[in-house]
Image: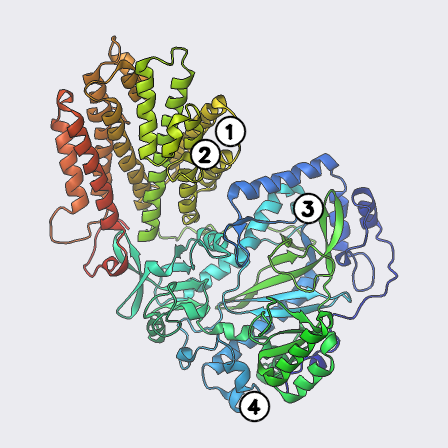
Amino acid sequence: MDGRSGQDQGASPAAGRPAARPPLRRAAQWARDYARLPGIPDEFLGADGQPRPVWTRFADTFAALAPTDIDRRFASADRHLREAGVTYRSPGDNAERSWPLSHLPLLIDEAEWAQLSQGIIQRAELLERVLQDIYGEGRLVASGALPAAAVAGSSEYLRPVCGIKPPGGRFLSVYAADIGRGPDGRWWVLSDRTQAPSGMGYALENRLVQSRAFSSIYKSMNAERLAPFFEAFRDALRASADRDEPRIGVLTPGSFSETYFEHATLARYLGFLLVEGDDLAVSGDRVHIRTVAGLKRVDVLLRRLDSNSLDPLELDAASRLGVAGLMDVVRKGGVVIANMPGSGVLEARALLGFLPSLSRRVLGEDLKIPHIATWWCGQKSARDEVLSRLDELAIEGAYGRAVPGFASSGPLLAGELSAAERERLRAAIVQRGIDYVGQEVVRLSTTPVWENGRIAPRPFVLRVFAAATPDGWTVMPGGFCRIADKLDARAVSMGDGASAADVWVVGDKAVAARSLLPGSDNVRIRRIAGVLPSRAADNLFWLGRYLERAEATLRLIRALAAQHRDPGKGSPAQLNTAERIQRLLLSWGAIAQTSRTQGARVADEALQAEDQFGSALSLLKSAQRTAVSLRERLSPDAWQVITEMSNRLAQDVDDDDAVVSTAELLLEKLASFAGLAQENMNRAAGWRFLDMGRRAERAINSARFARQFGYDEATPEDLDVLLTLVDCQITYRSRYLIGPSLAPIRDLVVLDLYNPRSVAFQIEVLNEHIAGLPVLKENGLIERPQRLAISLGARLTAAEAAHLDGRTLFALEQDLLNLAEAIGQHYFPHGPNATRPEKLTGLA
């Protein structure tokens, strides 16, 4: 038995279609009207050379749209992607990229899809059984059906997994295959994805965008819905746990992951918790989530990080992404991990050549979908074949895309290398063939894309997903399509120039609408929003603080600009007030020391200086970075407000009027976000921590404003600015028929419980929030955050405005800072302090 797949599979997709093609009928008319095609996309034509009916149906409807209507719909799709913040990262990227969605879907007939689904299900079941044998009895290796070196050579083969019975009964809960159509019309498997297949969340987002932009076409095409697949997948994960109402988490590497947006999308859509390794802790024989109410058991983890990173004790000791002791819990059956650690071993291209014979041996049938002819150079006969045809084949790493010893991150085409590099490659294969495979060069079919107002053919790869359920495997109707930006692409990844497309499986009958909402009345009613991980609470608290701090900075900017625009500017009192505003902006890190002599340009710097950590731009960027870690908890409207603010500040501000108008616009956006949080968020722990962050920061800022502008010798100009900063001009004038007076203003800003901007009001609200949070100790004593808040509230209740001098206000400001720090230390502890052994009570 050798590792050649070409002889078992027949011809590869390199075989071409005859050059002569019949006309496209209606599709041709569509093409002439809208594209003047330089070439006909292969997907337009079937194996018989005739137009595919699914495309002529689409063409009939699409051609009825006016060009302006088409442009409007495409623009709507692009706008939704921007507003929803759909992003990804390419390997090595430091910043996120906007999601590149192709404006035209990929269409597949339901009959053809049924055949594809059967092949995907067969392949998924084969790989599941191979994994069970590799980590179980090992009969395939012992019998010689699978060379030991082809398995053990992979870094994804994990010895600690050997002998473990997978909790939940399966190694694979979700499987994906990258498939492509050759120019002859046949589908081929290009690679298997068994580690933690990505793309399901993006496929969901693609469908959401396309079905909205072309709702009438989408309905008329009878495209199968995605919701039933996700419902089956969610229910299968629930059924895999050992209790009726399990807690399920999506385990992500964090916000710097290439596909973090997708992780958040899946968590939000499926109703799971989005957790990082630092959110989890092992206690006894179970895995728990660190929450603001203590440790809460988690039953299932949908894994989105590599196996080797899962447990630094038994796997990669350098990993900071996993959970110490996790493998021991898995060994004891205490948590289900989907997919099981070690499942990525089947992604090795070294195994591809053995799958046809393994299918006959394990399943008793041939593979229904062939894969690219592949030769593993770890065996002499296959190595000789590769060396004899070196210039014709693509050379890839046997256990990863990178070719060992070469800088390329993808396959190498020996025929395109220099003579010296080709000989170096040959020598490397001869010396250590186990690390290399040879594959037939992939020539992909093309699908239509909309490019510069016209249709153009581009190669594509389709990723198809299958989920294991108690009733067998179910396949997502569609999948995740990646489209290359060049006609000669031999492989497609989400790198420079590539785009994605929605995939419609088209039928003749109308498709019933489906959603993940329960359809029966026997659902247990709840009024609790579930657990809140400490990390999420920390991020919500700081999101509130950053936004409130940005609001204070914007109010200072607006007040400073007003001082410079006042017709009476230049008076000593006004200069003194402007100097105080600048001094406060300097102490907040909004401007540089050297900028204070630049007059009105100080406001511009405080608004948009990227190198000043306290500028409005820096604060809103910090808020956006924090919000990225909360994607699954923020509504689309809330996320849109945050992104719009950052985008607005990214634009140039030319003059003082533009500075003021920008500051006012951003203040309106901040008010919008506050309104969304106040009216739309459930009153659970998440909302409390967001509001606590805002209240704590507002109390600090109001106290600081009172100290800076409500000092003992404050001028009317200073007091007027203070009223403006705390948004109390109307309230003051309605109460007092005199000009600005120190004692009444101090009372209004610091002590007035009826004023939602006063310090006392913030402390009262903070006391209410803290009282509603979980009690972390059962010793009956008041915990430190509550003790500080109660003490502050009592002092402010007993205080009199006439006695609020500068020293008292400074002490008040420091106590408020201590309260904010105490909240963080108490509810968001890090490291070993995060594990709380006591029984805990209260809202999670």
Give the number of the mark in front: 3 or 2: 2
Give the number of the mark in front: 1 or 3: 1
The residue lying toward the viewer, choosing from 697 and 390, is 390
Amino acid at pointer 1: Val
Question: Which numbered tag is attached to residue 220?
Answer: 3
Q: Which element carries disc 1, helix, strand or loop?
A: loop
Give the crowd class for mark 3: few <14, some 14-19, many >=20 residues within 10 Å. Answer: some
Residue that numbered label 1 is attached to: 653
Vertical side of 587 occupied by 125: above or below: below
Give the crowd class for mark 1: few <14, some 14-19, many >=20 residues within 10 Å. Answer: some
Residue that numbered label 2 is attached to: 608
Residue that numbered label 4 is attached to: 144
Q: Which element carries disc 3, helix, strand or loop?
A: helix
Distance between the alpha carbons at the discs numbered 3 and 2 = 48 Å
Q: Earlier in the sequence, mark 1 or mark 3?
A: 3
Give the number of the mark in front: 3 or 4: 4
Amino acid at pointer 4: Gly
Query: At 26% from the left edge and 10% from the top edge, which residue is drawn?
Result: 739
Distance between the alpha carbons at the discs numbered 1 and 3 = 47 Å
Q: Which element carries disc 4, helix, strand or loop?
A: loop
Q: Are marks 2 and 1 in contact (CB under 8 Å)?
A: yes
The image quarter containing residue 603 is top left
Q: Earlier in the sequence, mark 2 or mark 4?
A: 4
Distance between the alpha carbons at the discs numbered 1 and 4 = 71 Å
Q: Earlier in the sequence, mark 3 or mark 4?
A: 4
Distance between the alpha carbons at the discs numbered 3 and 4 = 53 Å
Residue 92, position as x, y percentages in the image: 52, 58
Amino acid at pointer 2: Gln
Vertical side of 332 occupied by 489: above or below: above
